[in-house]
Each structure stands twice: as C-alpha cells, then as structure tokens.
Amino acid sequence: MKRLAVKRLAALLLAATALAPAAADPPAAPRPNIVLIIADDWGYSDPGSYGGEIATPTIDALARAGTRFANFHVSASCSPTRAMLLTGLNAHKAGLGNMPETIPPQHQGRPGYNAVLAPGVTTLAQRLKAAGYATLYAGKWHLGHDAGDLPTARGWDRALALSQSGADNWENKPNRLLYERADWTRDGKTARLPRRFYSSTLIVDEAIAQIDGVRGRPFFATLGFLANHIPVQASAADIARYKGRYDAGWTALRAARAAGVARAGLLPETPLAIMPSTRNWQALAPEERARWARAMEVYGAMATAMDREVGRLVAHLKTTGRYDNTLFVFVSDNGAEATNPEANRFTTFNAHLQYDMAPERQGAPGTLTYIGASWASAAASPLRGYKFSAWEGGVRVPFIITLPPALRQARGAVAPAPAHAVDLAPTLLNLAGVAAPAGLEGRSLLAVLEDPGLSVHPDDEAIGYELSGNAVLWQGRWKLVKNLPPYGDGRWHLFDLMADPGETRDLAAVESVRFAAMQAGWQRWAKANQVLPMPAGYSAPAQIQANATRDLLPGRVAPLAATLWLLALGLWVGRRWRGG
C-alpha cells in the first residue's frame, strides 16, 4: 500500500478520535481491531517464517501478509518485556526493574523495583479504552497479583489472567518448583477453571468469548500464552509428529536453523558463537540422547499447538466478519528458556518429588519437561545466548505486524533496522487513531510498515537496558553488553550487530574510543533510570531458588510439621494406653 494512503487514513482516524467525546459512537473511518499475541520463551528461529523447522502455519501466514522484524529487542525475561510492550516505557520506568522471581531483597520496593506495574503508569489498554476500544485479556499477566495490579484495574474490561510466570498446562496447578498455587483470576476474582484443559485452548476459548461479547466498537485483545514456558507440555498426537526430528542433536539443529534464518532473508550468514553451555551430543549415552530428543519434540509440539489455537481464533474472526478489520501482532517475550530444574541436588529432589520425571512420559499431564541450555542455544540460532542473558539470543525475538487489508503493507516484507519493545505502544496508538502522549519512549513503526527499509531510530540514538545486572546500550548498529555469571564474565564487550549479529567478534579494543563513549552513555542512562548495582555475588538462577525457597518453605514445612506432631501424639497416646 502506498505511504500517502496510509497517512491519510491515519490522519482521518486521529482527527475523528480527537473530535469525538468520550461516550460518542466510533468515528466514521473504521478503526482496526487489535490482536496482540505474546508467546512465552520462543527462540528467535522457532517460527517457520524465521527459519525454523517447527510447524507454525498460522504465524507464517501472518508473516506472509505482514512485516517480519529482523532486529526487534525485548527484555531477557517475562514481566519486564510485558511492561514495555504494554506501556511504551522501559522496564525500570514502568516498575519492572526486576521481577518477583529474580529480585534480590536489597532492591525490593526501591524506585523502579516494584516488581509489578508501578502506580501511576498508564497502560496501552487504558489509552485505547479512553478512545472507545473494548479491552480484553486472556492468559499470562505476570505484572502483579493484588487487586489493584490485575488487568481489570489497569485498563482491561475483561480478563482471565495468570499473575505468575507460568503454570501447569493440563490442569489448575502451579509450577510447583516456584509457587504453592496457580493464581488464575477472572475479572479480578479467583477463576474457576475446568478440571482438565489445555492452556493454549483455554486462552483462545476465553478470547473468543470476550470478543463475541463486544458490540459496536473495536476491540484490543491481548493473548498471553504459556507456550513454551516450563513445564513444557503437549498432547501425545502433537508430540508424535516430531518423532525423530531432533535425533541429530542440538549442534546440528543450530547449524540448520542458522541456514534457515539466512534463507528467510532475516540475517546474513554469520559465524556462530561458541556456546560453552552446549554439550557434545555424540558423547551422550544413547538413553540420554533419547531423553533430550524427546524434550525437544515436546517443545516443538507445544509451539505447534499454540499456533493451531491462534489459527482457530483467526478462523473465528473470519467467520464472524471481523478479520478484514483486524491487525495482528506476534511477539515472544524473550529468548528460549535454558533453566535446568535438575541442576543441583535440592532442585532435582524437589522436581522428582513434585512431578513424574520419567523420560518416556515427557509432556504428559503431571510431568515437568524442559529443554535446557543446549537446545535453548539452538532455538536462538544464529544468535548467542538465551533467556535471562543480555546476549542477542536472550533479547532479540520474532516480531510480526500484520495490518488489515485497508492498511496492508508489502506482503512478506522484512524490516532489518533496529526496533524495540517500547515501540509497540506508540505504533498501535498511531494505527488506532489515538495521539501518543508525550513521555512515551518508543517511536511509532508506521513508517517501517510502509517502507521496511526505513529506520525510526537514528544511528546516534542510545537505547539502554538492564535486568539482573545484565546490561546493554544499543546505538545504531553497535551494541555494548555486559553479562554477569553464569551468562558472561561480568565485563563490557562491544559488537557490530549488522556485520556480526552472532556476537562473535568483540571490538572493544579496536573501537576503543566508541567503547569508552558508549560506556559513558550507559552510565548516564542508568543514572537517569535509577538502576541499582547488583549485590556482590548475585546470580539470577541462585536468586530464583532463594526466593522460591523463602516463599514455599512455610507452606511445605507446616503440613510436614503437623504430620510429625500427630505421629508423635499418636505414639504418646499409644504408650499411655499400653501402660494403663
């Protein structure tokens, strides 16, 4: 579509919204419905349209009809990304300088470290609701669990929401390694869920019901899927379609994915970084290779199941006549999850106590499946790193925008220039005909949707990032990055992402002047956003375990203590009775 036509329609929408009172009928120019699809822990090359082998026909169809962004950045973990996507502010300003699972006690309650959306922060839903949109939410929220922090208190009219990082996909049970119960709410009250369900189906069922309840106005529907967060689970039928697909191992998959990304036109063929976390596949015992291959089969199956449910939503919108006026956004909240719940004796004991860990049952109800660091490295291919790290594999993700026919951009376009999570809110406001207020940090991507070769971020614009001590300053093609152990060495490094997206050649010494200037730029950004230094010896995985132990121990110890007390009482009564 020509740029002039898009600009004229955007101007009409903006003018109509500005002139209409709050309770007036929608403007004559149709405002698009918006469906925001947030996948959980998908690696850069997981979707088929991003070079992967996983069957994702619905997402691939959206990619063919829209724009794929090759260089889109988020946070390296769940809730900070969601805060940025849904506010247009960086995570520190939105209150998610860290999340509940990884925040150290020293930071709790400090400015920017609310671990929930901060009071006074305005969400995208609040802005669209004020402009006449129906605002709907279904799925993972992870931005607060108290009544004032749930979606219906932050601008959504209707919401089925999970306040935690994840939960079981087959029944109303929590991730037992982190939580005592699954905190699902519907419209601010404890939700009653079916005895058995599948999470992706549950979320789309709810979204369809919410959308069907909207009459006479456009809707903004946010779908927060649990796929593919731990526990990775899928049906036997979906798992079966991947049987044998991953028998060659993670190193072979990483190479195949890199070639697929290049063929898809997203990134040039690039050297692959050496991933110290990747084990030698051939050195594993046959039964261990079979166990890990099965885990990745479940991962692929879970992604395919989610894609099928998105397809069911698309089909429903077509049947009900709403598809042609709906724009879609697909994004992952961070890179693939590398956490190993069997990394030490305590977590291994807990995992086997709480779940069926039989290798042949991976993915089934009652199981805890995970793909670990080696497969997560392959899922991020050709990038370096994965979830929690500030390497590109942790923070660069698939991102697709597909506009309705009246606004449709060039089909199958690839946008190579940098873009960021904070850009989504001003983009959607722009497309909805709502004036983006001063103070948003992002930039509307409308110009890129019209001409994918453009960039909305000038080469000299500095974009900062920090989470759990892992930090970045992006500036045009350049990236300054530091990762604390276990993800890095704690030192700053410099990369040219256009020439080396795999972050294989550190240019800190060669570009010493730029290196020093960008370090100073990051310090300015950190000061402006009140970024706190991490406590000595901080490690995100260790903090997750410490926080989970603190939260779970009382609930787990109390029943055990009560049982022991009753046992002791019974023994005492028995002795008294025999003595009498």
Image: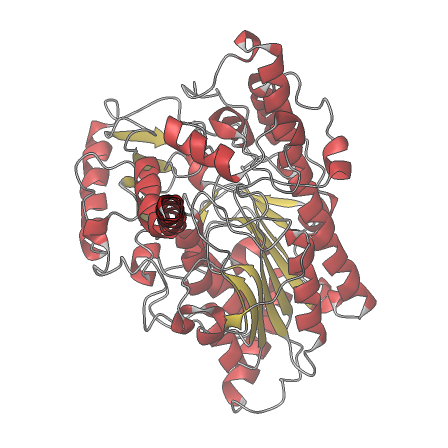
Say which residue appears at 59% left-offset and 39% top-offset: 232
**Residue 396, how many percent across, how many down?**
47, 40
**Residue at image coords 21%, 52%:** 107
Q: Nearer the viewer, residue 262 or 281?
A: 281
Q: Whole-percent x and y of residue 408? A: 68, 59
Residue at x 74%, y 53% (from the top left corner): 311
| Above or below for 56 versus 35 | above
How many labels, in total? 0
Residue drawn at the location 30% of the way across and 25% of the way down = 507
Q: How is the image coloured?
A: secondary structure
Quarter of the image for residue 356 reads top right
In the rendered structure, the answer to whether residue 341 lies left or right of residue 4 reads left
Extreme residue in the front direction: 580
Q: Is residue 209 visible?
A: yes
Relative placement, left or right, of 496 versus 6 is left
Frontmost residue, 360 versus 475: 360
Quarter of the image where the N terminus is located: bottom right
Q: Position of residue 365 (x, y in %)?
A: 65, 42
Residue 442 or 383: which is nearer the viewer? 383
Query: In the picture shown, does residue 131 fall above or below 444?
Result: below
In the picture as drawn, the residue positioned furthest to the right comes out as: 319
Kindly indicate the quadrant of the structure image that contains residue 568. top left
Above or below 227: residue 221:
below
Query: Is residue 531 shown to the viewer in this render?
Result: no
Say above or below: 567 vs 293. below
Provide residue 498's location: percent of width, then percent of height: 44, 33
Instruction: Name the one closer to the observer, 506 or 126.
Output: 126
